[in-house]
Each structure stands twice: as structure tokens, then as C-alpha cells.
Amino acid sequence: MAGSLNKVLLIGRLGADPEIKQMVNGKSVARLSLATSQSWKDKNTGEKKEKTEWHRIVVFNEGLVNVVQQYLKKGAQIYVEGQLTTRKWKDEQSGQDKYSTEIIIQGYNSSLTMLGGGNSGGGISNDNTQSNNDDMSQISNDMDDEIPF
């Protein structure tokens, strides 16, 4: 369909170390749990409120999977551009259909960039552009929220 766009842009922190799996075809895939948060002040009480959303990120590009495996850890801040995809699967225990919505990083219209202040930063994307990869050891590990999936 002409005139449609499926593009997701997120900046957040990893809630866990990346999970790297081998697919049936022998290629690697990376799965990330990304947290994005918004905060506000409650108008009635004046107290600070915060809401965290969790996003499933799936990286299919072999080069990016290697970067994810080598440099990303729980707490790392990243910027991702990808496509929203919902897949259907059957729960083995109940036999019921289940759905998972994921952001897919694959092809030339997607990217993953490592962010952070101080000594961390850089990134790599699927459009053959690469920026500096500095030491990622300084990334804060202050993301202790439980991952709901």
C-alpha cells in the first residue's frame, strides 16, 4: 500500500543483558528488553510519578548481533530505529494463541546506536554508516526494574 509507514524510534536502557540465539538457518539473532520511561509531577499531590514501558527488540542483522553481543550489557542506553511487528504463536501449555509485539532491526531502514554520557557512545546501523565505538564500561547499571516478560 502506497503512503504507509511502519517506523519505530526509541531511546531507552536495557533491562537485562542481550540474549543471543542461533536460528535454524545457522544465523544469530539478538533479543533485547528495552525500557523507556516518562516522569511527571502529580498535579494534586505534587509527588513525582514515573511510568516505564518495556519493548522487545529483535536484531536480525549479523553485524549488529555481533556488536550487541560484544558491547551491550544491562543498563546500556541505546537508540533504535526499526519496524513494529506482531507475531502469533501457540502456548504449549494452554494451547491458546498468544501474540508478541516486537521492534525488528533488519534491513537498510533500521539502526541501533549505543548512547551514553562521558566515555561511552558510538553506534552502528544497517545503512553502512558507523560512528565511534568508545569504551562501554562506563555505562550506568542503574536499571534494576524487573522485566515483565
Image (tube, grey):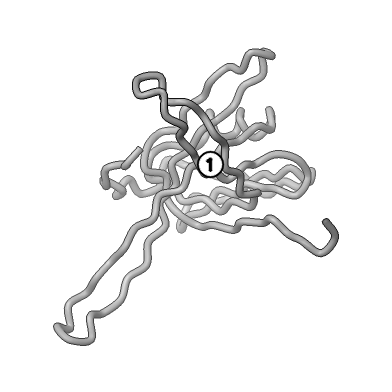
Q: In this view, does 77 lie above or below 104?
A: below
| Relative side of 39 to 57, left or right | left
Q: Quadrant of residue 4?
A: bottom right
Work out whether residue 121 or residue 32 is closer to the camera in this orientation and state it: 32
Question: Which amino acid type is marked by label 1?
Answer: Ile
Q: Where in the figure is residue 90, as x and y percent of width and height?
A: 47, 26
Residue 117 vs 110, above or below: the answer is below
Q: At x 56% / y 53%, what residue is drawn?
A: 79
Q: Where is residue 14 in the image (x, y as percent from the top left)?
A: 42, 44
Badge 1 density bin: few <14, some 14–19, many ≥20, Cα 10 Å: many
Residue 35: image location, x then y, percent: 40, 51
Q: Can residue 145 be seen in this view?
A: yes
Q: In this figure, what is the number of numbered marks?
A: 1
* Residue 23 vertical placement versus 49 (above, below): above
User: Outermost residue toward the left?
Assistant: 45
Most foreground residue, 144 or 50: 50
* Residue 33 rendering spot, x and y as whole percentages: 43, 41
Give the answer, above or below, for where 26 lies relative to 73.
above
Residue at mark 1 = 57
